Image (cartoon, grey):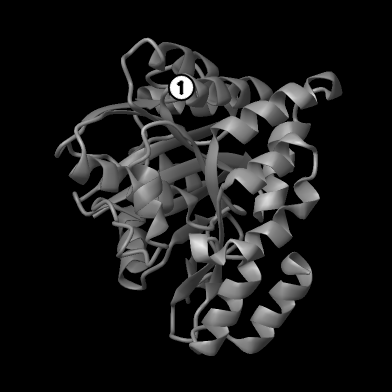
Amino acid sequence: MLRIHRYFETAITRQASDLHLKAGSPPTLRVGGRLLPLPEEPLAHQEMPTLFLPLMDVRQQEGLRTRLEANFMLNYQNRWRIRVCIFRQRGCLSGAFRFIPTKVPSIDQLKLPVRLKEMAMRPRGLFLVTGPANSGKSHTLAAMVHEINKSTPRHVITIEDPIEFVHKPRRSLFTQREIGLMTKDYQSALMYALREDPDVILVGEMRDISTIEMVLTAAETGHLVLSTLHTVGAVQTVDRIINVFPGHRHEEIRTQVSLSLLGTISQVLLPGREKNQRVMAYELMILNPAMRNLIREKKTNQLKSTLMLARKEGCVTLKDNLTELLRDERVDAKLVNALMKEIVE
């Protein structure tokens, strides 16, 4: 067994989400959202290449040499897919590893709101999963695609960097493309995806104005598009999309968003009361005519109050969801109060 495989096994046994290997520090796990150093000696500068290079093929090693970093997926014993990020810092190699189960999760297993099943069945439009890094966005997207796969015969194209969950066809047909390996970038992949007879397009991340513009076009032209943004809350999400464009285009983009956006779920993972547990808190916005008018009329600051009035339609504010988690004693009161002060209010 490779030495790094021993670290992988330890991470899996302890239900870690991430493993960090850096010279000068002991191997460190992230368990339940908290960093946990292993009781070992700090890793030495000279041993880092022997840890990482056996994991990499020639192309990946060349990428590390020329770009000073390498990002790829690793299949580990048919049980896990590991997202590998190897990079240089302070003159030596370091690595970060994210553990992803090979089994695609369902909406029910993740305890996501049931309205996401309905969103996954929509024939066209844009649905966004948002939140900070490491908030479970990829899992939520995968669960929505799983719902499509088990329910309807549709052609699903995923564009990711890298591919995290591999979907096995059930009722749907899949095309999964990885940035840098199977396609140049998100913009190119989206352009060609529209020529490949898709019903559903998953875009791993809307990173730039070109990608956002093509996503809006795809949603407008009769496709269901699922994607992510690093925003917290429905209001910030809508504003981010609009404000990434130059001012003279805001009215046009507001109209596009008001017509094509189906909804958003904004999520954050919190340490649970049980050991090594993380609990998701979320805000769910399902657009109704009143919300679409607010977006079109440049009144996104009023979305929050409209969201509260739309509870019967399945909308949930982050504050309401945090209150529910607190009532069910699933999270710590101090943590919830701090989050409400920082994000909600």
Looking at the rendered image, the quarter that the C terminus falls into is: bottom right
> Which of the 4 quarters of the picture holds residue 249?
top right
- Residue 174, by quadrant, is top left
The residue at the point 19 percent across, 32 percent down is 153
Q: Residue at x 60, y 44 (%)?
A: 289
Q: Which residue is mark 1?
A: 180
Q: How many marks?
A: 1
Is residue 112 in sight in this rendering? yes
The image position of residue 66, as x and y in percent, is 56, 21
The secondary structure type at the circle numbered 1 is loop
Between 195 and 288, which is closer to the camera in this rendering?
288
* Relative depth, front residue between 293 and 174: 293
Q: Is residue 146 left or right of residue 241?
A: left
The picture places residue 52, in percent across and down from the top left corner, at: 42, 43
Residue 284 location, x and y as percent?
54, 58
Question: Can you see residue 82?
Answer: no
Taking 166 as reference, is 136 left or right?
A: right
Residue 275 image point, x, y percent: 44, 84
Quadrant containing the N terminus is: bottom left
